[in-house]
Image: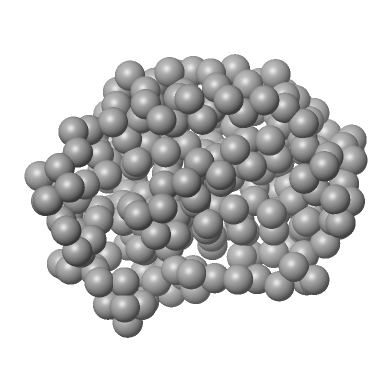
Amino acid sequence: MLSRPSWIDFGGVDRRHLQFTWDDARVYEDLKGNPSAVIEAAAEMSVRARFALLVGLYEWIVWRFDMLHDRQEVKDILEAAWCGTIDPRYLGFFELSREDWVGPVEGPLWCAFTYLEKGFRQAQAFQKNTYQALKFNYLLAKHVLPDGERFERWLDLTLKRLVQVYPVPPDDPYTDVFDERVGAHLGEFIGRDTLDPSLPVDIERDRAFLARILEHSRKAENPFLADEDELQDRSFDGVPYVLPELE
């Protein structure tokens, strides 16, 4: 369903030229940069905005390597992650073998979606996971992208928008003591077009996108979308796979 969004622009660079260092045995040592601006901004935005930002970072990595591999899992995870911004429990738990994803194309992709999944897992209780995922995927994107300046311009504008439009909402620890209605307390819904700095924020457009991606993922039987049994195990309360009205 998803194609590369216009806000991801590589400036006409030939993406087949992999001009970055990659060694599957020492990924962390090769990632350079300062993620403090990302982490500081994330602390000032809603949880759902952090999810959208994390998916946006993953998108940059996904499309950087598009057409350089034949792995369908990469885009299936992307679609399931957008569903996860509705409720993080929609993104099913998964572990893909590291040994099956090696080299300068599939290696970075494995790292990216592994941290993405970690950033969503039990995020309402362990927000540290989301911050770690944001930090890692930011550094990974900087490392593998052919035009870091375009990425940084997008990121700067996107961070400012998310902080301004989707600030941290007031916290009431007694509204959902048993974490059954996680999705209702993450802040306003955020669609994919909100990550496009050239477009104004449009709540109805965002809701329409999320409803479509949820419906498409279910009909396509996306293997990374949590099934009803898994949701039940995660104490999901409500009508699953339907975009709710926020309180």
Rendered image quadrant of residue 241 = bottom left
Q: Position of residue 75 (x, y in %)?
A: 57, 57
- Quarter holding the C terminus is top left
Q: Is residue 89 above or below residue 201?
A: below
Residue in front for this viewpoint, 65 or 95:
95
> Is residue 122 something that shows in the picture?
yes
Which residue sits at x=70%, y=49%?
66
Residue 189: where, in percent of width, then height? Answer: 27, 41
> In this rendering, does residue 68 appear at all?
no
Count of marks overlaid on the render: 0
> Residue 49, position in %: x, y?
37, 36
| Residue under the point 60% across and 71% down | 95
Q: Residue 99 is drawn in which quadrant?
A: bottom right
Q: Which residue is at 36% across, 63% downward?
A: 90
State the image coordinates of residue 175 (x, y, percent, origin top left).
Answer: 11, 51
Front in this rendered view, residue 155 or 241: 155
Q: Is residue 83 left or right of residue 170?
A: right
Task: Determine whether, in the image, residue 126 is placed left or right of residue 231.
Answer: right
Task: Identify the residue at horizontal 16%, vertical 58% (top origin).
Answer: 177
In this orientation, which residue lies closer to the viewer: 169 or 243? 169
